Image: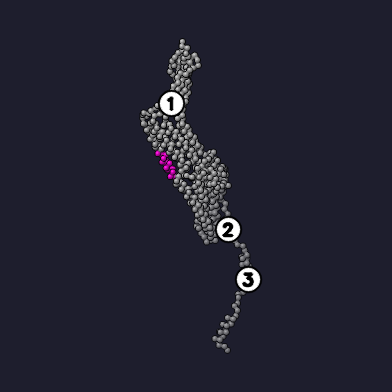
Amino acid sequence: MATPSALLVLLLAAAQQAPSASPAPQQPTPDASAAASAPAPVPFQPKVDDPMLTPVPAAPEQVKTWDDALTRVRQRSTDLRNAEAGVSRAQGRWRQSLGLLLPNARATAGVGVDVLHPDVPSAAGGGFVGGSNTGTGVAGPSAPLGTVSASLTQSIIDVGAWRGLSSAKASESASVASLQDVQRRLTQGLAQVLVATVAAERAAEVNRVGLRQALERQAITQRSFELGAGTQLDVVRVSQDVAVARQALVAGDEQLRRTRESLGLSLGEDHGVGVNPEFNLGGLVEQTRQDCAPLQDLANRPDLVAQRANVDAARESRRQASAGYLPTLGLSSTLVGFTTDPGFGRFGTWNVSAVLSMPLWEGGQREGLVRERAGIEEQAAQSLEANRRNVGVEVSRARRGVEVAEALLKTAAESVELADRTDRLTRRAFEVGRGGSLELVQSGAALRQAQLALVLREFELVQARLDAFLTEARCDW
């Protein structure tokens, strides 16, 4: 008989040599099989329907092309008509100044009757004409008496008149340059309001997308609350976000209406005008190059040219006032004729005279005029310097603005991408119960702001390129 120790050894050896028993396979239950073959549950799809999601009605009138808009500005712009009238006014002033240096001829005629002495010849305007035809055989003045006279005057030496002509010529040059500057500014203003209108249209669309997304979040939150996975605080937070989205939509729609009205005013209309969706906004810079040419020298910009011409006109006007102290020399000739009896008439006198005029004392009026025009000259000079500085800063900002707009557009695009990813992940986490309503609201608001900022940056880049070109261009229509 084996001892207990030997028996224990035999049992351990048998246990090591025996194969390991595998568990019997379990048959699946009918419920488990049905659960495995069932399709995955469809996620909740919120449906929103809100009256504010309806887009703003299209404007009754729309701009289709840049040429169409510019043609309407040329035809109906009050600023352009005002500038053209300024040119006509300056030309009229120059012609008046020239008339003082050219011959001046005048003819007058009249008939005079002496009511108390009808037989006595009396000239028109009063006075008697002597002479008689009784027994002399020579025709004398008739009664009633008809007279005719012709006079001719010519300025020979008049320094003040020449200075006045120079001042008028400079004013005419200034008005022409001002007209060119108005044309440039109208072109720039039209381009700006077109870009602003298209940007407002796009911003209104983005605001509606943002409201729709906010309403969808509200529906998801309400559904979660009804199923017991959310709280009343979650519903209130999301509803507050919807209210903020509505405010942005209302403000954006009003901005759209205002930009349409501004476009209408630029086109000479008293109602809002929209932009056709097919309008080529991207090629606006190339289109403006057809009507405007870049300047080789910034000093030739029309507003600076006009300011310099104004300084020249003020200087010549001051010299004209100073020339009033100098004497003037002129030539005068007068021919007088009258009716006779018997006969038709004859010329009585024809004189030619030289006239020297010497100013002596005018009570200080000339001195005051000189001082006044000296002040006008100084004001014109200071305006020129201020405008020159402003133009320098304007051009520097315009050149720098393109680079800044490109950098801002790049960062805005990156922000939209990140905000969209954050919003999608936040909504997914909230739907499975791993996120809160606060994160959902914050991600939605950040996405709306990023999308709106991207739209604005895109149009700011177009506007920056337009400004960079038109600030150093001259437009001749």
Q: CA distance from mark 2 to mark 3?
A: 35 Å
Residue 44, numbered circle = 2
Tell me if I can see residue 469 in this picture: yes
Tell me if I can see residue 244 in this picture: no
Q: Secondary structure at mark 3?
A: loop
Residue drawn at 56 percent across, 86 percent down: 6
Say whether marks 1 and 3 touch (CB < 8 Å).
Answer: no
What number of labels is visible?
A: 3
Residue drawn at 43 percent across, 36 percent down: 313
Measured as percent of width and height from the top left, residue 20 is found at 59, 78
176 or 43: nearer the eye?
176
Mark 2 / mark 3, whichever is N-terminal: 3
Q: Residues within 10 Å of mark 3 (few under 14, many from 20)?
A: few
Q: Secondary structure at mark 1?
A: strand
52 or 450: nearer the eye?
450
Amino acid, disc 2? Phe
> From what the image shows, is residue 364 above or below residue 460?
above
Q: Residues within 10 Å of mark 1 (few under 14, many from 20)?
A: some
Residue 27, numbered circle = 3
Q: Residues within 10 Å of mark 2 (few under 14, many from 20)?
A: few
Say whether marks 2 and 3 touch (CB < 8 Å).
Answer: no
Foreground mark, 1 or 2? 1
The magenta-colored residue range is: 378-390
Q: CA distance from mark 1 to mark 2?
A: 104 Å
Residue drawn at 50 percent across, 37 percent down: 84
Amino acid, disc 3? Gln
Amino acid, disc 1? Leu
